[in-house]
């Protein structure tokens, strides 16, 4: 017990506390002027905005994928089920260079897209693509166990009572999946906001246009502007704490919805 | 296997509604019209192919684009070799530390009751939700030249940042939760009866742990170590911030991929990347095998 706490403190708590202490050394005006500078605001806006858009795509596509994997049988189903985990397991730098090669103007997908006039690599769309990639597993893996456990009888009951298939899905199945769907959305969002490795290769990294907040932290550190780096980090950290808290509440809500029979 | 049946409510003629419903309830009611099913499967497969399969294929295609000889030559460069060695060393230390801690933490949380347990679990989870860049930044703030202990470290000539200890610390931070998280639910489920029986039969604490607890959780331990190792070898953001990118000294494999890529040495960059991609694929295969063992262990 004591050992657990000591180790936790040494590796996690003391370093994180250091970050907050550093922030306290800044005066409120300093803190505010760092955060309200144009470049910081744009980086935060790009990270949070694109991460939210990517998480929404993951929500929709994740629901479709998990439905296909759980409810239907098709050749290669088990393979595709395993493939969902690749973004978890693949080192982010590898994902970054691979996506860049794929979507660059001469890449397999970049070339046809360029003919259509869509430039993906080295634009904000590239950041979005990388964030979608790393968020794929979250919605699928949080919803999958819930969908598998769903009692078939409630669907049959709905159909017997005259609901058509669409009504059954929207009114009966989706509400039971809501907590899991929202948890997946929140986790994908949190991951995308903080993502660094897979994004920086494809992003182009133009200040104010395609520069994500984690990259700005790295740039400020390399300029020895520790205060700036710390202030941005604290904002991102507070947001991830809020997300963890929200996810924990969601899980509790999900548990309370299971009928106590 | 109800979802394999192709009947759907809408396709049956409305004349005999009652019977149609009864037979539908018995059979194909829990599925959608064929067109919808095909559309959903196609979308899912297409999306996963574009976003997951193609990037994997690109890595290997680029790595072998100049032939196998060029691939092998790129991997046998001394700098590539030293990056591989450093990655293995760092992963071995971090996984070892987190294995030891993870087992102790899971044991304390699962087998004893105390206040603030949920809080402790959330703290263990913390590194999962912190941006990798911030994970590196916290160590720069502690040990960097302007950091809290920077001056003291310089006086005593101890190098942590931009050296192997810093990389190990950052890697340990980001891989902190894996082993503990794999074990906590498993150990909670198993309860304490077997340990109590062992103790009451006269076994010592350590004997109980090695003869009773450990055999029960061995698949869970392997599962945690596997995921911990995959992340430790592949970590980029946190390590990038603390490493200083000194070629041949503090470059891990993912960092070396970045450097080679930025120098337009694509065969070499994707060569190292292909090794990491293979690590990911092997990890997923072993994970599937371990999951089967873990499922069998369930009552």
Image (cartoon, rainbow, N blue to C red):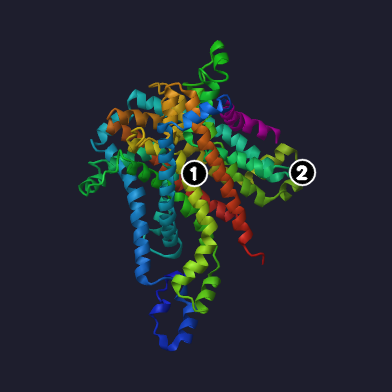
Q: Nearer the viewer, residue B290 or A166?
A: A166
> Looking at the image, which residue is at 72% across and 48% down?
B192
Q: Could you tell me which secondary element the residue under label 2 belongs to? A: helix
Q: Is residue A113 magenta?
A: no
Label 1, residues with CA under 10 Å away: few <14, some 14-19, many ≥20: many
Q: Is residue A19 magenta?
A: yes
Chain containing mark 2: B
Task: Report which residue position mark 1 lands on.
Answer: A190
Given the current orientation, which residue lies at the most extreme front position?
Answer: A29
> Looking at the image, which residue is at 63% across and 31% down?
A9
> Looking at the image, which residue is at 41% across and 26% down?
B251
Q: Could you tell me which secondary element the residue under label 1 belongs to? A: helix
Q: Is residue B107 visible?
A: yes
Q: Which residues are magenta?
A: A1-21
The reply to whether callout 2 and callout 1 are in contact (CB within 8 Å) is no
Say above or below: B277 vs A74.
above
Q: Nearer the viewer, residue B272 or B290?
A: B272
Closer to viewer: mark 2 or mark 1: 1
Q: Position of residue A217 (x, y in %)?
A: 45, 30
Residue B199: mark: 2
Position of A250 with respect to B65 (left or right) is right
Chain containing mark 1: A
Position of B119 with respect to B151 (left or right) is right
Given the current orientation, which residue lies at the most extreme bottom position?
Answer: B15
Q: Position of residue B26 (x, y in %)?
A: 50, 78
């Amino acid at each position: 017990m004591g050992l657990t706490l000591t180790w936790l403190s040494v590796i996690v708590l003391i370093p994180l506390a250091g970050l907050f202490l550093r922030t306290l050394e800044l005066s409120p005006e300093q803190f505010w002027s760092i955060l309200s500078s144009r470049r910081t605001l744009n980086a935060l806006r790009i990270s949070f905005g694109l991460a939210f858009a990517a998480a929404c795509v993951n929500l929709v596509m994740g629901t479709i994928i998990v439905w296909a994997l759980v409810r239907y049988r098709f050749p290669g189903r088990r393979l595709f089920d395993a493939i969902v985990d690749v973004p978890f397991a693949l080192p982010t730098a590898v994902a970054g260079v691979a996506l860049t090669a794929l979507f660059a103007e001469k890449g397999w997908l970049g070339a046809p897209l360029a003919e259509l006039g869509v430039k993906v690599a080295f634009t904000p769309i590239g950041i979005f693509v990388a964030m979608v990639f790393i968020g794929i597993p979250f919605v699928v893996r949080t919803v999958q166990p819930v969908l598998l456990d769903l009692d078939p009888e409630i669907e049959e009951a709905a159909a017997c009572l005259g609901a058509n298939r669409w009504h059954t899905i929207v009114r009966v199945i989706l509400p039971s999946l809501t907590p899991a769907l929202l948890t997946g959305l929140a986790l994908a969002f949190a991951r995308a906001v903080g993502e660094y490795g897979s994004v920086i290769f494809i992003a182009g990294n133009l200040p104010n246009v395609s520069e994500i907040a984690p990259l700005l932290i790295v740039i400020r550190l390399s300029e020895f502007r520790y205060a700036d780096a710390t202030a941005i980090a604290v904002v991102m950290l507070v947001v991830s704490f809020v997300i963890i808290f929200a996810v924990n509440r969601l899980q509790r809500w999900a548990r309370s919805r299971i009928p106590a029979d | 296997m109800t979802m394999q049946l192709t009947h759907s409510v809408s396709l049956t003629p409305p004349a005999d509604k009652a019977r149609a419903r009864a037979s539908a309830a018995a059979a194909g009611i829990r599925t959608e019209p064929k067109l919808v099913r095909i559309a959903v499967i196609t979308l899912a497969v297409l999306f996963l192919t574009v976003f997951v399969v193609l990037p994997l294929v690109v890595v290997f295609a680029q790595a072998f684009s100049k032939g196998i000889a060029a691939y092998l030559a790129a991997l046998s460069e001394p700098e590539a070799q030293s990056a591989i060695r450093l990655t293995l060393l760092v992963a071995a230390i971090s996984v070892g530390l987190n294995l030891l801690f993870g087992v102790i933490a899971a044991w304390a949380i699962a087998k004893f009751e105390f206040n603030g347990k949920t809080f402790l679990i959330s703290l263990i989870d913390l590194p999962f939700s912190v941006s990798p860049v911030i994970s590196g930044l916290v160590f720069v703030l502690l040990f960097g030249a302007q950091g809290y202990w920077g001056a003291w470290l310089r006086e005593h000539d101890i190098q942590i940042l931009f050296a192997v200890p810093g990389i190990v610390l950052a890697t340990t931070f980001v891989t902190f939760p894996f082993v503990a998280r794999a074990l906590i639910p498993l150990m909670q489920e198993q309860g304490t009866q077997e340990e109590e029986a062992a103790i009451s039969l006269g076994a010592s604490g350590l004997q109980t742990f090695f003869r009773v607890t450990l055999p029960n959780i061995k698949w869970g331990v392997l599962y945690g170590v596997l995921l911990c190792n995959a992340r430790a070898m592949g970590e980029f953001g946190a390590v990038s911030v603390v490493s200083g990118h000194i070629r041949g000294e503090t470059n891990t494999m993912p960092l070396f991929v970045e450097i080679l890529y930025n120098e337009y040495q694509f065969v070499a960059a994707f060569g190292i990347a292909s090794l990491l991609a293979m690590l990911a694929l092997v990890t997923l295969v072993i994970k599937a095998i371990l999951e089967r063992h873990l499922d069998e262990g369930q009552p």
